[in-house]
Image (cartoon, rainbow, N blue to C red):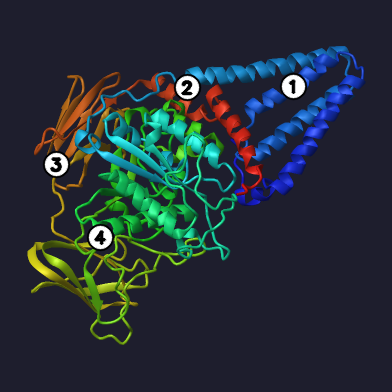
Amino acid sequence: MIHVDWKKIKPYEKAPFAIPVIVALLVLFLAAVGIAFINPLLYMPLKVLTAVFAFITVAFGVHIESRMLQIYMLLGVLDLSMFAAVLMPFPPGLTIFFFIASLIAAIASAGVSLFAGVFFTKETLYDFPETERNTVFSGKKVMFFAPHEDDETNLYGGVIEQYVKSGSEVRIVFSTNGDFYRLGKCRIREALSVAESYGIEQDHVLFLGFSDSITDKNGRHIYNAAGNEVIRSAAGYTETYGTKSKPPFAKCDFTRQNTLRSFINVIEKYSPDTIFCCDYDGHADHRALSLFFEEALGDIRKRKPYYTPLVFKGFAYSTAWDGAADYYSLNALSTRLKAPSELMRESNVYAWNQRVRFPVAKESLSRVMQNTSGYRAMQRYSSQTATDHANSIMNSDKVFWLRKTDSVLYNAQITASSGDPSHLADFKLVDCADICKDTGLPLKGMWVADADDAQRIVAFRLPARQKICRIVLYESPAPNSHILNAQLMIGRVSYNTGELHNGGPTVFSFPAVDTDMIGIKIKSGTGDCALLKVEAFTQPESQKAEFIKAQNKNGDFCYDYIVNKSGREVFTVYSFPEQQDLEITAESSDEGVRCAVENGDINVYCPEGEQAVITVRSKENPDVLDRFRVSNPDERERYILSFKQSNEQKMWSFSMQWDYYRGLIRRLGVYRPKHKN
C-alpha cells in the first residue's frame, strides 16, 4: 500500500475539492465514451476493452492509503486509457497486441489475488491446545465500552472472543455513533455485523446514540459543556439516534447531563461484574468516554457501596491503532509502545510494568493476518479502513490497567488545612477543563495546599469504622511536582511514606487498623506537592495467581511457538496477579522434546523436525495452568512462512481487495449532507 502524509492530503479529500474533481473526471470518461460511438476507428471494441483491462490491472495492483486519492487515480487512468483508445489510430497489429497484453495483465492480476487467497492462508493458523481459563472468562457479566464503532476491535479484539466462547454474558456499549463524517448509520450496521461475527446477540449491542465529537459554540466538548445546554453536532443532530432496527439506548437531547445519565443507566440496568473501557486517550471522544464512565461509576458507588465490579482501562491509540507495526514475526509479539516509556504518557498515572496482560483467543492468532478473527472483524469495518492498522493492532496479548473499585473513601467527608480537597476520593482518576484544546497532562481536580500553609494536612472521615489495611496515593502526574515524604495517619497509627512514585500509584500495606479517620500530612517535596487521588481498602491485594501464561525471554506470550534453529529455548511464566516467586512445574507431551524447570525458567530442547505440547502448572494450584506448542521446522518450512509473511501485503487476496474497495465506496458517504431535525 502507498502511504500518504495525512496532514498534506486532508485538504484534497474535502468536499469543495473532491466533488468537482470527481465530476470532472466522470465527465471526461463520458466524453471518451461518446467519442467511441462517433469516431469509427478500426477495432474500436478491442481498444475500449484494452482500456478497461488496463483499469482493472491498476485497480488490482495499486492501493493508496487515501481512498479519495485512489478514486482520483483510477478515474484518471480510465480517462487516459479511454482517450488513447478512441483517439489514437493504432495499426491493427499493434491494437491486437495491446489488447492481448492488457488481457493477460488483467488475468494475471486476478490470478495473483486468487493464488494469494489460497496459498497464504494455508497452514498458517496457530495450532495448539487452547487452555481453558474459566475462573477468568466464564460465568461473567461483561460490558465493553467503546467510543466509536471499530474501537472495540482495536481495544478488545482477542479478549471479547475469550468471554463469548467461555459462556459469559457479553455486552458492547458504544458511546457515539462515529458520525463526524456522516457515516453514523453505516457504522452502526457495521458494528452489528462485527458483533455477529463474535457470536454476540444484537440485543447485547447497545448504542447510547450520541454524535461524534459534539462541541458547543465555544469549541468545548460536550463533556466540558454546561450541564443542560443542548448542542448540535457536526453531523447536524441534537438528540440521540440509531437506525430503524436498532434505536438508541435512550432517546434524549445532546446535553452533558443526559450523557452522564445514559452511562449511569446502562451500568445500573445490567450491573456487569467486569467492565472494560478506554482511558484518557489521544482523541477527545475517547477521553470523554473515560471521564464520563468514571464519573458515572463513581456516582453509582456512592449510592451502592457494595457494587464493586472489576474495571480494566486501556488505550486504543498508543497500544493499538498507533502501536508498533510488528505483526509479521515468526512468533506473535507482545504489545509494545512505539516509544518505550515507564509511564503511559497520556496521563502519567499508569505504569507500564503494572499493566495486566490478557492472553488472546486461539482464533485471533495466525502467521498471516487474513486468517485471524481480528482481521476479519476489521474487514467488516471497511468504512473506517480499519485493516490498514491491523499490523499495529494485533499482538500476542491485550494490555489493560486494573482500577480497584472497592475503596472505602467515596462517601468520606474530606477536610484540609487549605486548598480544595473535594475530588481526592473520587473514582474519576484524572480530569481536564478542556479535553479538546488541552492536549497536555490532565491536572484538574488535584489537591494543592496554599503556599503559606505550614501544615499541609488533608483528612478523611468515613461514614463508619473500617479495618483499613492498604492505602494508595497518587501524586500529581506533573513532573515538576514531587512528594519526598508524607505522614499517613490511620486512626492512632502513623507511618512515614518516604518518596512517592513520580507518576503511578504508591501502595502502602500494613496490619489492619480499625478506624473512621485517615489523615495525610505532606512533609517535604518539590514543586506544589499536589495529591491527585487517595484510595483506602479493607482487603489486602490478592497473592494467588488467577491465570498464568508462558512467555519467551522477550516477554512475548507463547501459543504455537517456533523455537530457534538450535532447538534450545528458555521460557518464563507471566501470572495475574503478578507473582515474583511463583513455583511451577512443566512437562512435555513427547519424549523427543525435553523440558525442565530451573529457578523459575523453563528450559526446552526441541530438535529439528520435532514438536510437543508443553504444559505448565502452578505448584500451589495445579488447576492454574497453561499449554503451548513448540516446534522446530526445517529450513524449507521456515522459508515458506517467511515468504508468506513478507508478501501478504504485496499480493492482495480477493478478500483484501473486496475490503479495500467496499471501504472506498462506503467512504463516499462522507459527502452526504448534514442531518436536519
Mark 4 vs mark 3: which is more N-terminal?
4
Residues under labels 3 and 2: Cα distance? 41 Å
Q: Residue at x 9, y 39 (%)?
A: 620
The residues tagged by marks 4 and 1 sit, at their Cα atoms, a distance apart of: 67 Å
Q: Residue 248 in the image: x percent, y percent? A: 46, 43
Going by the numbered disc 1, the residue's amino acid type is: Val
The residue tagged with tag 1: helix, strand or loop?
Answer: helix
Q: Is residue 128 above or below residue 26?
A: above
Q: Nearer the viewer, mark 3 or mark 1?
A: 1
Foreground mark, 4 or 1, reads 4
Residue that carries the numbered disc 4 in the rendered image: 302
Quarter of the image holding residue 61?
A: top right
Disc 2: which residue: 120
In the image, is 413 to the left or to the right of 188? left
Of 614 and 234, the residue lying toward us: 234
**Front: mark 4 or 3:** 4
- Badge 2 marks a residue whose secondary structure is loop
Picture layout, residue 162 above or below residue 443: above
Residue 288: quarter of image: bottom left
Measure the C-alpha gap from mark 1 to mark 2: 28 Å
The residue type indicated by label 2 comes to Phe
